[in-house]
Image (cartoon, helix red, strand yellow):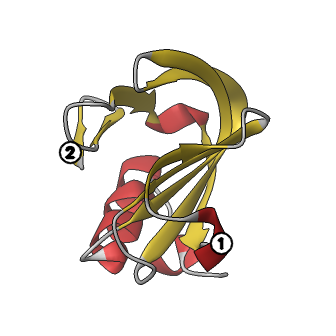
Amino acid sequence: MQLQDGELRVRFGPMFDERIPVDNIEAAEMSRWPRWAGVGPRSNFRGVVGLIGSYDGIVRLTLKEPMEVHVFVVPVSCHRLYLSLENPDGLLGEISKARGEPPEATKAA
């Protein structure tokens, strides 16, 4: 993850590389990803996209406006993006800072 110039760049191997405007992030919070949904780049093709390498450290980004992203070059609508991260608190803190919020604002689950 890379936050720069008001955009969060999200990459997951060679199959996912998207930029999300911070202004379009309605909520960023700790979450869970169900084991039955598996690991890797995932989508239910109804607005949920998961970039899951582990079942730990899951962050859910809820977008104000759905945006089109590409999972394995397939365009899908994304309203909620789940990310597994080694340092989820770091990303939540960066998003809070970029939005001008206190750090505690994004930690609620």
| Left-right relation of 79 to 101 | right
Q: Classify 6 as above or below 35.
A: above
Q: Residue at x 41, y 17 (%)?
A: 73
Q: Nearer the viewer, mark 1 or mark 2?
A: 1
Q: Position of residue 53 (x, y in %)?
A: 34, 65
Q: Which type of secondary structure does the marked residue at label 2 adopt?
A: strand
Check disc 2 and give the amino acid type.
Gln
In which quadrant is the C terminus drawn? Answer: bottom right
- Choose between 24 and 79: the one closer to the eye: 79
Q: Classify 108 as above or below 76.
A: below
Q: Residues within 10 Å of mark 1 (few under 14, many from 20)?
A: few
Q: Residue at x 51, y 17 (%)?
A: 74
Proximity of marks 1 and 2: CB atoms separated by less than 8 Å: no
| Left-right relation of 12 to 97 | left
Q: Residue at x 53, y 65 (%)?
A: 38
Check disc 1 and give the amino acid type.
Trp
Q: Residues within 10 Å of mark 2 (few under 14, many from 20)?
A: few
Can the viewer see residue 1? Answer: yes
Q: Classify 76 as above or below 16.
A: above
- Choose between 63 and 38: the one closer to the eye: 38
Judging by the rendered image, the residue that carries numbered circle 2 is: 2
Disc 1 or 2, which lies upstream in sequence?
2
Can the viewer see residue 31? Answer: no
- Marking on residue 54: none
Judging by the rendered image, the residue that carries numbered circle 1 is: 36
Residue 9: quadrant of the picture: top left
Q: Which type of secondary structure does the marked residue at label 1 adopt?
A: helix
Q: Classify 20 as above or below 42.
A: above
Q: Position of residue 37 (x, y in %)?
A: 63, 64
Tell me how far mark 1 sits from mark 2, CA to CA.
Answer: 29 Å
Q: Position of residue 107 (x, y in %)?
A: 54, 80
| Left-right relation of 75 to 54 | right
